[in-house]
Amino acid sequence: MSDPIITPDAEKDLIGISDHVEEAAGPIIAGKLYDRFLDAIRRIGLKPLAGFTRLEFADERHRFWVVSPYLIVYRADLRPVHIVRVLHGARDLPSELEDLS
């Protein structure tokens, strides 16, 4: 299985999260979190159906993977898998995910 594609929206999310965590907790913590995201993305690429659906937020093409307290949202039906968003679980998910395609 090939590495997932990180969409521009997901890349923007990752940069924003990293910047926020670095400012709040320092570069070491931000780097460790970023590594956790990369590890999760690699795992998603290997087993795309391992994540879970949340039909109240997105259709069955989309799956979710937890990197607590964040959610990686991805298209499991595409090959390679597309990472479409990375969001804090406390965000307004219906609003953040209303434009998924």
Image (cartoon, rainbow, N blue to C red):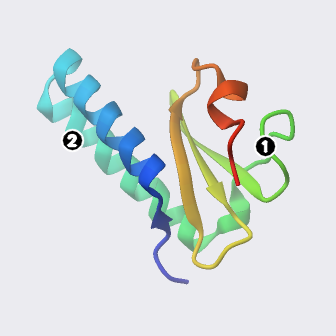
Give, as a three-letter code, the residue at label 2.
Gly
Residue placed most toward the observer, 2 or 68? 2
**Labelled disc at residue 31:** 2
- For the point 73% across and 27% down, which residue is it? 94
On the image, the x and y values in percent for residue 71 come to 57, 38
Q: Which residue is under mark 1?
A: 58
Locate residue 90 relative to residue 16 in the image: left or right.
right
Question: Eyeballing the image, is 2 above or below 39?
Answer: below
Among all residues in the image, which is located at the extreme left?
27
Question: How many badges with numbers are in the image?
Answer: 2
Q: Amino acid at mark 1?
A: Ala
How dense is the environment of label 1, judged by Cα within 10 Å: few (below 14), some, or many (20 and up)?
some
x and y percent of residue 87 in the render?
52, 33
Residue extending furthest toward the front: 99
Image position, residue 40 (x, y; %): 48, 54
Decide if residue 69 is on the left or right side of residue 21.
Answer: right
Name the residue rendered at 64%, 19% in the picture.
Answer: 92
43 lies above or below 25: below
- Quadrant housing residue 75: bottom right
Q: Residues within 10 Å of mark 2 (few under 14, many from 20)?
A: some
Which quarter of the rendered picture does the C terminus lie within? bottom right
